[in-house]
């Protein structure tokens, strides 16, 4: 589980670094400009890392299933080799998904004015400024981004609901059960925070709505910051380690 959490933390750091630095720079300049190459790069990495994180959350659901339903075989099932393969498949899935988005975007004609109604480049923004009929491209993008988000979201909720039912049905009220339930609830929280905004942005026609910018900020900046906080508050081992670290720091300071 901690190997997968480490990969999730890395993806969160990368994800928040795609849009936030450019947004902070734009706060201090009057003309907010990004090159076409920079726009495509931002779009590519946004979907590459975002889709990889979605697939990784699906892998983490399988990890929880193995830990809860096959506890005696957990170490054998989720060995380091399988974990590395599953993480690599998640990254590969994100790469393929992102390449599809970029391939659809770069073939569109742009006649100007090329002004994006947001603080970063995304397919929903770039498609709107294309001077061509983008209905086929939008349909493929909604299918590849929106449908994947909806299907993964429903599948994850159903899997965690099944795990919670299994825990309450076959386990007692011991410490191991409460830890497993706590881990499942933290995963469910992350899934809702990750997939909710993603479904709102991509699983509908790419029209402009008043909530778009608020959801975009939450999806690209706030959500990656919430992940480690949620896992810290829900994980007993992490809280114990932090208490020991703080206690050690206080003792060193007193000396």
Image (cartoon, rainbow, N blue to C red):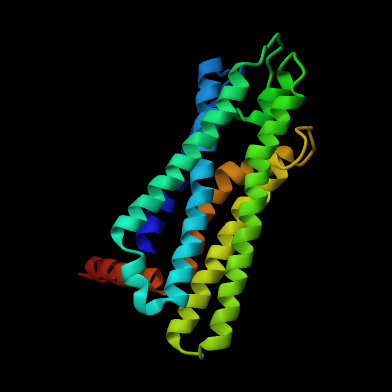
- Identify which residue, 6 or 105, lies in the foreground: 105
Q: In the figure, 174 relative to 128: above or below?
A: below
* Side (left or right) of 76 relative to 144: left
Q: Find the residue positioned furthest to the left.
A: 255
Q: In the figure, 15 relative to 24: above or below?
A: below
Is residue 74 something one can see in this rendering? yes
Q: Where in the figure is residue 147, as x and y percent of width and height?
A: 67, 45
Q: Where in the figure is residue 198, as x and y percent of width and height?
A: 65, 45
- Identify which residue, 234 or 248, lies in the foreground: 234
* Side (left or right) of 188 relative to 112: left
Is residue 117 something one can see in this rendering? no
* Side (left or right) of 212 relative to 29: right
Q: Quadrant of the N terminus?
A: bottom left
Q: Where in the figure is residue 230, as x and y percent of width and height?
A: 51, 62
Q: In the figure, 138 relative to 172: above or below?
A: above
- Label total for image: 0
Q: Where in the figure is residue 186, as x and y percent of width and height?
A: 53, 66
Q: Find the residue positioned furthest to the top.
A: 111
Give the residue at x 31% y 72%: 244
Give the residue at x 62% y 30%: 122
Q: Quadrant of residue 210?
A: top right
Q: In the figure, 192 relative to 212: above or below?
A: below
- Identify which residue, 188 or 93, lies in the foreground: 93
Give the residue at x 44% y 65%: 63
* Side (left or right) of 79 relative to 148: left
Q: Quadrant of the C terminus?
A: bottom left
């Amino acid at each position: 589980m901690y190997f997968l959490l480490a990969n999730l933390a890395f993806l969160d750091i990368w994800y928040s670094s795609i849009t936030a630095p450019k947004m902070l720079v734009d706060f201090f300049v009057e003309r907010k400009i990004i090159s076409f190459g920079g726009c495509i790069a931002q779009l590519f990495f946004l979907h590459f890392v975002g889709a990889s994180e979605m697939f990784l959350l699906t892998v983490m659901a399988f990890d929880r299933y193995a830990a809860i339903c096959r506890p005696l075989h957990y170490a054998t099932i989720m060995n380091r080799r399988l974990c590395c393969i599953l993480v690599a498949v998640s990254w590969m899935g994100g790469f393929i998904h992102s390449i599809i988005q970029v391939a659809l975007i770069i073939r569109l004609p742009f006649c100007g004015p090329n002004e994006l109604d947001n603080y970063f480049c995304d397919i929903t923004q770039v498609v709107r400024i294309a001077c061509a009929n983008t209905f086929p491209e939008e349909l493929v993008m909604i299918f590849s981004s929106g449908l994947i988000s909806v299907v993964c979201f429903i599948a994850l909720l159903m899997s965690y609901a099944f795990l919670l039912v299994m825990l309450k049905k076959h386990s007692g009220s011991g410490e191991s059960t409460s830890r497993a339930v706590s881990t499942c609830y933290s995963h469910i929280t992350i899934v809702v925070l990750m997939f909710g905004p993603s479904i709102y942005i991509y699983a509908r026609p790419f029209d402009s709505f008043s909530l778009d910018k608020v959801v975009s900020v939450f999806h690209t900046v706030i959500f990656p910051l919430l992940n480690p906080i949620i896992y810290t508050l829900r994980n007993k081992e992490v809280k114990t380690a932090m208490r020991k670290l703080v206690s050690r720091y206080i003792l060193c300071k007193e000396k």
